[in-house]
Amino acid sequence: MESESFNEQCFDLTEEFKIKIPCRLAERVESYASANKTTITVVVVEALDLFLRGH
C-alpha cells in the first residue's frame, strides 16, 4: 500500500505534530521563547527549519 506524501495530506498551511522531548529540552525551549518574547511554536519551527536547511 502506497502512502500519500505529506504535501498530499496537508491541506492547511499548518499541521499539528505531536512529539515527546526530554523535559530539560522543553524547559530550555520555553525559557528561550520567554526571553525572546515569542512562542514555543515559533522557536521550534525556526529551529527545525534552520536544521533541515543545513545552516
Image (cartoon, grey):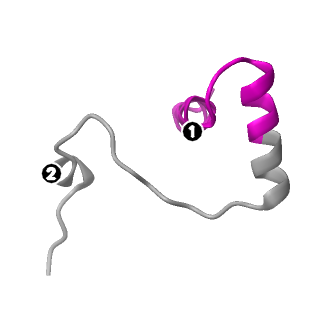
Q: Is residue 48 left or right of residue 27?
A: left
Q: Residue at x 81, y 21 (%)?
A: 35
**Disc 2 from disc 1: Cα separation:** 21 Å
Residue drawn where x is 52% and y is 33% of the image: 49
Circle 2: residue type = Glu
Q: Which residue is mark 1?
A: 48
Tell whether position 54 is magenta: yes
Seen in the picture, residue 28 relative to 42 is either above or below; the reply is below
Quadrant, the N terminus = bottom left
- Residue 9: in magenta span: no
Q: Is residue 3 above or below residue 8?
A: below
Please tell me the numbered disc located at residue 8: 2
Sequence-first tag of 2 and 1: 2
Q: For the magenta stretch, what is the residue range?
A: 29-55
Contact (Cβ within 8 Å) of mark 2 with mark 1:
no
Residue 23: give x, y in percent of width and height.
Answer: 80, 59
- 37 left or right of 42 in image: right
